[in-house]
Image (spheres, coloured by chain):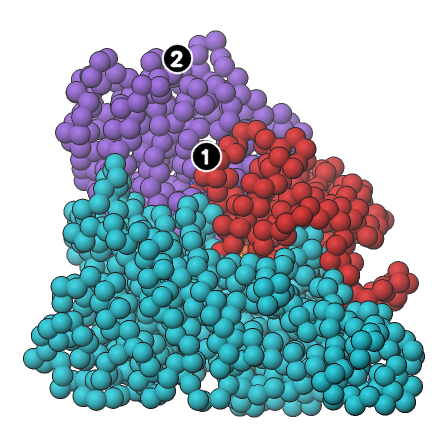
Amino acid sequence: MSDSIIGAGPKRIDGQRKVTGAAPYAADHHPDNMAYGYGVFSTIARGTVTGLDLDAARQSPGVIDIFHHDHFPELHRSPSSMAQGNKVEETRLPFEDNQVHYEGQFVALVVADTFENARAAARKVGVSYQRDDNAIANLDQGVKAHGTQKGQGNHERGDAAGNFDGAAHSIDVTYTTPVENHNPMEMHASVASWEGDRLTIFESSQGVVQQRGALSKIFGIPQEHIRVESPFIGSGFGSKLWMWPHAVAVSAAAREIGRPVQLVVPRQQMFTTTGHRPETRQRMRLATDERGRLVSLRHESINTTSFTDQYVETCGSVTKSLYSCPNLLVSHETTRVNRGTPTSMRAPGAAPGLFALESAIDEMALAAGVDPLEFRMNNYATRDESQDLDFSSNHIREATEKAAEKFGWQDRNPEVGSMRDGHEIIGYGMAACNWEAIKRECEARVSLRADGTAYVTCATQDIGTGTYTIIAQTVSELTGLPLEKITVRLGDTSYPKGPISGGSWTTATTLPAIAAATREAIKELKGYATGEKGDFAGVDSDSDSLTFENGQLTHDGQSVDYVDVLKGQKLASADGHAHTQGADDKYSYRSFGAHFVEVRWDPGISNLRVSRVVSAIDVGRVINSMTARNQVEGAIVMGLGMAHFEATEYDARNGRPVNNNYAEYVVPVHADQPPEVDVILLDYPDLAFNEFGARGIGEIGITGMAAAVANAVYHATGKRIRDLPIFKEKLMENVPEVQSA
Amino acid sequence: MSDHHNNEGLGVETFDARSPSRRRFLKTMGASSLAAATAPAWAQIAQAGQQQKEPVEPRDDGAPAEGEQQIQLTVNGVAHTLNVKPNAVLLDVLRDRLMLTGTKKGCDQGQCGACTLLVNDTAINSCLSLAVSHDGDEITTIEGLSQGDELHPVQVAFWAHDAYQCGYCTSGQIMSAVAILNDDNIGSDDASVREAMSGNICRCGAYKNILAAVQDARGKMEGAS
Amino acid sequence: MREFDYARADSPRQAVSTHGRSEQAAYLAGGTTLLDLVKIDIMRPDQVVDINRLDLNQIETLNDGRTRIGALVTNTALARDDRIKNEYAVLSEALLSGATTQLRNKATTAGNVMQRVRCPYFRDGVSSCNKREPGSGCAAIKGHNRSVHAVLGTSEQCIATHPSDMCVAMAAIGATVTVEGPDGQRDIGFLDFHLLPGDTPEREHALKPGELITHVTLDAPLENSRSGYLKLRDRASYQFALASSAVIVTLEGDTITNARVALGGVGTKPWRALEAEKALKGQKIGEASFTHAAGIAFKGATPYAHNAFKIPLGQQAIVRNLTTLTAQEDRRTS
Ligand SMILES: Cc1cc2nc3c(=O)[nH]c(=O)nc-3n(C[C@H](O)[C@H](O)[C@H](O)COP(=O)(O)OP(=O)(O)OC[C@H]3O[C@@H](n4cnc5c(N)ncnc54)[C@H](O)[C@@H]3O)c2cc1C
Ligand code: SF4
Ligand code: FES
Ligand code: FES
């Protein structure tokens, strides 16, 4: 299989469109007669809207209509079921009533003829509120005010508490992580148009099928009357998995005014009304025996959720199975705050969870007097003890060793602050990474066409991960057609049902369906070839002696091009449709890896830099080496942001977001890119999982990154940062105490 | 990677062999009726970006209405006479009026770089620019970089190096890169390029590949330092 | 952005007369502050006077050795001007540390002087903010005040930093702001240009209504001086300073004969640390004298709940900048 296109790194088939600006994103659509919406958003975190002064806005040039809780069509809530295909994260509809649950909630929508007119008018809308001064601004306040609710994903085995006291070594530490925002480059956007009771909506969506299902429930119209299109999306990282209120608002507005309407969620409200990674507090209690073997592990987390919905950040999801430990407890709880509903952000649960777990493992190793690398090698699980299943394929030891060697872990002087270079103190840290591998059901259609091309459709999305390309690679592999001859269409509900682009499951879910559909098409082709008028009339179409390779049907030494088979019978195409199923439960399917990070701390100017990262990742078979590597490299950058800068801050007095913009919510820029980032892809096919052996690669790279950085920071500075992000003041000496007011 | 300067792979990404008349048909039909058509509605947009295939027609808005001002913008070599309101922003005028949607909006406040384009050969944030104050200016957008089917060396390099993921920051990154490569005052070392490109956020984090692409394009570009 | 009238001026006179003394009119230079704030409804001009076509684009050396910069010289052009790079390295470095390449291409010298605070409570349009709505209070003092709030020059009414990097260098160099207004032309000393918030944080600068900045003239460079700008922040580029220092020194052997120190990110205006300068003069170079002077610069500083770290950080910005400058042989100017 060495010259197979699977595993090679062809450049993306949609690349030309991206580099020429031709790739159409949601707000690039301008259907005829389109109007523009602009939102008015609440400026209190809790209370009621008591009045709207619309006079000035109505008289503003170009205004068509202004929607709000007293002027909005009666709609229905979506049951929000992923299984039914209609999940939304925020179940409350926009303008449902006059209640305000968070700052930055839609309170009105102005629609005008141009974008500038809509925005100008929105500024003129006056809103009066009855503010409820008991707004809950953060996790601590929530817990204090009304305690916690039980979440899901909990797990218990053995007796963790009983084996903690009296263990040879133990730690009891608490980690906290702040709200983070996905901040995809493309702001959420929808363009909705109606024709009768048929709705077409261009959406920046990671899940067109789910959005269609939700819109169908909300508007009470059949799914067949709704078309959701998202051929290109400016990324989402989870924030675009489920539809948010703006899409409902704009769809309703378009129906009411009888014109297509475009609505883009402004960057400020991307921090409020399109989800976020919630704040977490995680208590970790670990204990080992004399030799540093884990005997007790408890991971108890609380995360913030909204007053309208329950969202659980399953911080302990990885903790259940990464290490071997007979006595283990994982529990998740939530507490309500006046913020919008949180949602999955790249590696939900695992990203904050592994910050806590992998920091705690580092602390535990130190407490037990064992090198952190060795500690992990001694404690990595060999089977999934939480499910009592074998792993389908687990190469975490090799990943850890390979990365350690390439990184030069053996040169690490374990003494804190001992490695110096000029002004700088160097720290080395490591952490494991881990993510669940999931495969869902999927449909796809493949046509082998008489013009020598293949045409492939599936209602999944390419969110920047390279899905277009790997699907084309798959078809190419099975048909021998070059990539240039393969057209792939995604992100449109008129295609066969595909999965949401999330959970790193797109690859493992879609490729088997694409392959099955391709085989069906080949089968149909063989049927034509062996039929009455066919070139191989009379041959058994199922016979092994009839082969299809490189576009040629061959039997008994005689070959015919498939195009000629079709043309000979005046047929347009041979088509295949497939519906493949999700993964079985014979194994525990997970991906593994390890990050090694070098930081440089310059205490003279309190400057912290991540200067080097080596990561080895075991995600099964790599389908496209170029796009796969890019995914991990990008996740490392995001993980570095999480470690170092990213935090959405809220005013503790009233829950008001304070840095909700792209200048003050600090994400890594070009200059923060570590000069050396080295990603090793192990590439062991996981054939128990699917025929391609691929497990998916989008999220694993961010897991463990923040811990690896924090562990390196500890090694450099002796400061254990248990509260993200690692702002410089947490590492500085001599910061004056301030009496808090 | 070989030097692809033309439309290799285009067969994948242009939509069937739609004739120009078919395209015009799609465009005038509007999206709502397209829902029922066989081609995906978004196919109509392809042409907006494919400036090299079907150049944007010069636009003349006639006499300005009350509250509007008439301006001339030369965009990618095509002169347009447009009537705009003073509060119309250059980025929105390009995207919503001239349908040049290759230039993206990522923040609308000068904070992300997605809207970067060249005004009289200088890279600026078009979201913080009033259209009226650009009367008479020469504007180059991503759609104007390629010469016919031949991609600009920076575009070629971005494609070859996978210097993007979602592609949303890409127009801005490329426009910044073009400006930087043409600027003798900006060093050619990696650190200088990273610093100079720091106004172009890539949330996908493709920084490593973007740098590789910029450095690869250097030298393949006429006059690049 | 609400609606406004727009006029393009062809001469400073015309600009001034179109503007009039109206509080509701605004000059438009690069627009990177103005349009940002108009978009979020914090500034609501009803008349915008576009000054971009004025002939104020020159950088000239005057007979007395000073350097006169036209109001419309962009931050990019100023930073890369040979005279500036050679004789006022601190200014070139400060400019290049600010904002982003694209923004610097638009941002002008006068606009940069006039840029407004980044305080989130000022920008959100609803919190109590004495600068935006005099008498309404200051949400920042007991609110979130980590990155864009000051420890020097604060008052009970306002604690926002002046966010400019360029101005910090100019404060160290010494400069004069020339303005043209309804009442004619006048000069304002750079250190008098930006006002401390005191009880009137809504008054940010010494311009009278309608006055147009036409030039900023830098004092002649200190002979045999070396200078540099050091900016400290979270990420490595494109962020307002958490603390920064502009330092100019002259040496005789190991002795500091003259020093200028100004600070950014920590003061409610571009902060000239005159006492620290005095403390440096006549001292031997070395960590002890640098640390001592840095301590003096922050004497009386007021920390708030989240920004207390700026006090040690600002001192580090001074010490490291001095250390680097005095260790170098090749940064001598003229
Ligand atoms: C995302 C972002 C990041 C930034 N980061 C930094 C940074 O790190 N460091 C830094 O120093 N700056 C930073 N800035 C600020 C930037 O430097 C200023 O916005 C810029 O210098 C303003 O210049 P301008 O010409 O665009 O001004 P404009 O926006 O045109 O004008 C600003 C103000 O000055 C008035 N004005 C303009 N010209 C004159 C004149 N000649 N006479 C009288 N009044 C006049 C205008 O009416 C307006 O009120 C940043 C800005 C943004 C948007
Ligand atoms: S610090 Fe100044 S600008 Fe900020 S809220 Fe207080 S008064 Fe307003
Ligand atoms: S859209 Fe202009 S900088 Fe973000
Ligand atoms: S490619 Fe997605 S933001 Fe850069």
Is A138 above or below relative to C146?
below
The cyan-coloured chain is labelled A
The purple-coloured chain is labelled C
Q: In the picture, residue A690 is in which quadrant? A: bottom right
Tell me the number on the disc at residue C96: 1
**Neighbour class for label 2 at 10 Å: few (<14), some, many (≥20)?**
few
Residue A429 in the image: state x and y as whole percent.
28, 57
Residue A180 in the image: state x and y as whole percent.
40, 65
The red-coloured chain is labelled B
* Residue that carries the numbered disc 2 in the rendered image: C334
The residue positioned 33% from the left and 41% from the top of the image is: C232
**SS of the residue at dot 1?**
helix
Is B166 above or below relative to C59?
below
Left or right: where C175 falls relative to B67: left
Q: Amino acid at mark 2?
A: Ser
Q: Is residue A270 visible?
A: yes
**Neighbour class for label 1 at 10 Å: few (<14), some, many (≥20)?**
many
Q: Amino acid at mark 1?
A: Leu
Q: Are marks 1 and 2 in contact (CB under 8 Å)?
A: no
